[in-house]
Amino acid sequence: MKSRRAILGTAAAVCVAGALSGVARATTPPAGSTPSPEATVAPLTTEQPLTKAKVTLAVNPWTGSAVNANIAKVVLESKLGTPVELVDIDENASWPGLDDGSIDANLEIWPSGHAADYETYITQNQSVVDLGPLGPQAKIGWYVPKFVVDAHPELATWEGFKDPALAKLFATPETGELGQFLMGDPSYVTYDEQIIKNLKLPLKYVVGGSEAALLSAIDKAVADQTPLLFQFWKPHWKQLEVPLVEVKLPDVTPECLASAKAADGNYACDYAPDNLYKAASAKLKDKNPDAWALLSNLKLTTEQQSEVAGWIDRDKMSPAAAAARFVTAHADVVAGWLAGGSTPGTTAGTTASTG
């Protein structure tokens, strides 16, 4: 989820593709004008003809996913002669695609929302393979702007929202007497509606429609000093720009983890921390061994992914150009991915915590 989601931000409206040949072409701005971020990207040329089996990568509707996929595309095409197709798809629909091989890899899985998928596709069917950790550690949660907690310290915990008068501070014309709880993209795996119901909170679950809409709502709430309760995650570049406070939810219990796996609607806890991991179709290893090895070894730090996400969301670079900029600037990192072995890692210890 999810940051979804994750990391790092993203506007569902951001275009995610771009052929490598046109990805990082530097241009000379007119005299006296301010160059666009993309104009500062050094040209990146393909070093090999694209002769190997095409690889299809999932791009889920958050910027972190676009960052990973576009960086992988640049490296696979420019270094390994592998053509890459990026497919916009939600995180749930990615699993059947990995299962049947129509999608070769998804490079950012949030385990807190996919314990059942891990069990079905990776453990039981063995049609999907855990390619090991992506790198960033993340967590989904409930958030309010800091000024809300400054004025009402009791709203730093979910118990403060049991008070109808305090919950009503978040009301909108759409929610009436109830406080609004705002969600971003409707495709994200979320337990928020269940949490509200099972904790008997006077809140109404509202879907904003996209991460971009959620980011706009956060900016407006801060500018207007209007209370806002919403699902968000860390790390996210927006957290560095806007003071936000995570609302304390009930601790994660084995019962909640079992509920999440069973999808029985009884979830009433916080979200478990997420060690993001990569998943690939088991067919990819024979189809394109070099791509399999590269994706197994690809890792990004939280800071690296957040930096590229900021170029996309804040600086309005295309994901393709931002990825080319990263690959050019971090040749040593890319060389490490290419030099590594082909045996995937494992996140079994991480996913076990989510059921």
Image (cartoon, helix red, strand yellow):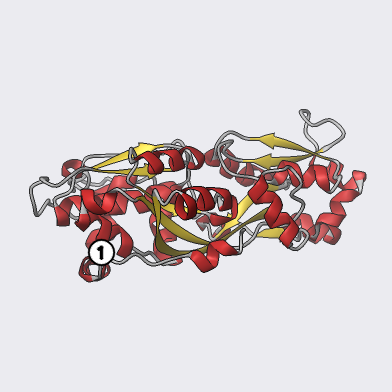
Q: Is 75 on the left or on the right of 160, as rendered?
A: left
Residue 273 in the image: state x and y as whole percent: 60, 63
Q: Is 302 on the left or on the right of 201, as rendered?
A: left
Judge whether residue 314 can be spotted in this image: no
Residue 16 in the image: state x and y as whole percent: 35, 40
Residue 172 in the image: state x and y as whole percent: 77, 33
Count of labels shown?
1
Q: Which amino acid type corresponds to the residue marked 1 in the rendered image?
A: Ala
Judge whether residue 319 can be spotted in this image: yes
Residue 197 in the image: state x and y as whole percent: 81, 42
Residue at image position (58%, 41%) is 216
Picture quadrant where residue 54 is located: top left
Q: Is 204 on the left or on the right of 22, as rendered?
A: right
Instruction: Pick the residue in front: 258 or 152.
Output: 258
Instruction: Pick the residue in front: 201 or 254.
Output: 254
Residue at image position (21%, 70%) is 339
Instruction: Pick the residue in front: 169 or 304.
Output: 304
Hey, which residue is sitting farthest top in the picture?
174
Residue, disc 1? 329
Hey, which residue is sitting farthest front in the picture?
124
Dot 1, how many residues are within 10 Å of its Cα: few (below 14), some (14-19), or many (20+)?
few
Work out which quarter of the rendered image holds the C terminus and state it: bottom right
Mark 1 residue element: helix
Picture quadrant where residue 185 is located: top right
Q: Is 247 on the left or on the right of 116, as rendered?
A: right
